[in-house]
Amino acid sequence: MDSMAARRRSALASLLLVSALSACSSGRTAPAGTAPSPAPGGRTTPAGGTSGRTMEVPVLDVFEKAVAQGTRLRTGAPGPKYWQQWAEYQLQAELNPVSKRLTGQGAIKYYNRSPDTLRSVYVHLLHNLFNPDSRQNTDVPWSVEGIELSRVSAQGTEIRAGGEEGPGYRVDGTVMEIRLPRPLAPGGTADLEMAWRLRVPPDGAPRGGQDGEVFFISYWYPQMAVYDDINGWQIDQYLGNAEFYMGYGNYDVALTVPEGWLVTSTGELLNPDDVLSAQTRARLDSAGRSSEVVRVVTERDRSPGTSTARGKDGKLTWRFRAENVRDVAWGTSSRYLWDAVRAESGDTDQDGSPDSAMVGAFYRPEQRGSHWDESARYGRHSVEFLSRYLWPYPYPHMTAVDGPTSCGGMEYPMMTCIGGVWDTLGMYEVTNHEIGHMWFPMIVGSDEKRFAWMDEGLTQFNQSQAMADFFDGFDDEARNRQGYLNLAQSGGEVELMRHGDRYPNYGSYGVASYYKPATVLVALRGVLGKETFNKAFTEYGRRWQYKHPSPYDLFNTFEDVSGRDLSWFWRTWFFETWKLDQAIDTVTSVGDSLEVVVTNRGRAPMPVHLLVTRADGRADSLTVPATVWLDGTKRTTIRVARGSGIKSIEIDAARDFPDLDRGNQVWPR
Ligand SMILES: [Zn+2]
């Protein structure tokens, strides 16, 4: 999920989450032996695998194995033997808005590009979160049910549930194992076919559902689980809190709804002539050339023949194709308005000429109170800003959908579902945040379940950069820092390198996934300087576009690009909950100098950035490297020439670092 703003808004929901999470924090999630979090006191080796690093960083054995096998490099780049799986989906679904039923069928061609022969493949049935027999750590409406499979076939053979051996399938919670009729050799493909039914959950369900008027359809089809070079099958249950790890593929989808119902989906609309009226097509066309928002469908237009084409038997089938995406979601309603505008995305295809994407908003008229009529404008700024700040937005459209309240803010490829009541600041924030997720984790496909900070923390950081641009210097970084400091000061913080379903409560999950990693990136920018930081950050993204990076690939890329040993930084901020409290202890006159004694009252080793302001107004910056603290030293002395007289001395005047107590950092006090 989501934006912290969305989560902040619902105190009650958070309370419920806290208690629900506490109730099942004993860890019933990942199968033993694949736990991602290096246990404190467990085996540690230098992250870079070379001796002489300044601090030990716990490394997973499986990462070391990947390096040994050549699928990953110690520089942080994919190795020469990197591989990943692929799938081609052909899905059809029909929604009956009256019964709230969706019936679907589909074919998946699964490509085994791994060096391993697979006897089983695993499929996520994420909708089974709503099966009363499944395990949950978040609130779900009790009246729903899981996905009902009516037909499953593999490699051309119909297979049945049950049994332990031979062709068949077994569903455990949200995970389905398919025992293949024939082993799937490296380089081979397996065809799967399924038919299913499900009930779209009511408002109150996380990340989608329906409120009787609008339907946001997410997790609606059987989806291949990721099989990767680090963990093999990643088949952690979907319990409601921790998010997802999804593989890449192409999707052809055909979505049937009543005529007059507008549909927006991940992917490019293939048959506009069949489903849109001439008027809607013409307005959409002009939006594609306009930097001003075009009202494509207004209140007066919402009827079959005016907004949509006329259907056959009162129905229309919308066809979309999405390439190189990790999921497909869609929204539909007869009540939607449709705004659209062109966004300049930069040179997406690297042919030397600028490209663009269509930014859209689908919303009900009464949602203007939550500034939905500004959504397309906010989305346009978000796509354009992030395309410049990171790399060009690659997909044909980016559309925000007014969904049930419990959507909060949730991202899908090219789509976001946003629910609830918003002021302008919050509406920009949630829109930008979810759009920011197109870069992480939609394009840079990390494992959100095990390392939530890799998508939420990076996105929270990027959101701050965009908000500073849009709101003219607005300091969202300070909000993140305060969010982290509040928990760090009160205790109860846990480390970032922890599975998203294994936090003791929602507060510690939120800080470790959003506020702290965003704050830590600001600190890293302070350590490396803006230019080197930006270079390393975008290089990490460039290396891992449409791939599956591990945390070590991010750490190693920053070290590779900056040429610095940052082991002390990773250990401190990702594996520990060490705190930072640098203080100016004493300042004494010695000859023509001042001796400044700086103490480290916390455990986090960080450089000392000292700003010395002189009586004549000149200011000097001095840096003491973090290495002074690494042998356990608690105090260091810095000598400053007195010159024309010194007015003040301040530690970290730029506020790059999350220091617990700012009051002891300035002299004179
Ligand atoms: Zn998010």
Image (cartoon, rainbow, N blue to C red):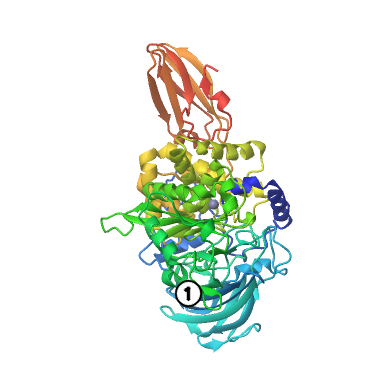
Percent x, y of residue 4:
58, 47
Q: Quadrant of the C terminus?
A: top right
Determine the residue positioned at 62% across, 38% down: 488
Percent x, y of residue 648:
47, 17
Q: Circle 1 sits on which residue? A: 89
Residue 654, visible in the rendered structure: yes
Seen in the picture, residue 186 relative to 456 is either above or below; the reply is: below
Determine the residue positioned at 47% across, 20% down: 649
Percent x, y of residue 337:
52, 57
Percent x, y of residue 356:
35, 56
Seen in the picture, residue 330 relative to 424 is either above or below; the reply is: below
Determine the residue positioned at 39% across, 43% down: 533
> Which amino acid type is marked by label 1?
Tyr
- Which of the pair 479/376 is nearer the observer? 376
Residue 563, visible in the rendered structure: no
Badge 1: how crowded within 10 Å, few (<14), some, or many (20+)?
many
Q: Secondary structure at mark 1?
A: strand
- Which of the pair 184/348 is nearer the observer? 348
- Which of the pair 587/471 is nearer the observer? 471
What is the tally of numbered marks visible in this picture? 1
Q: Quadrant of the N terminus?
A: bottom right
Question: Under 8 Å from ligand 1: the CB of mark 1?
Answer: no
Place residue 646 in its image quadrant.
top left
Farthest residue toward the bottom? 157
Place residue 524 in its image quadrant.
top left
Farthest residue toward the left? 352
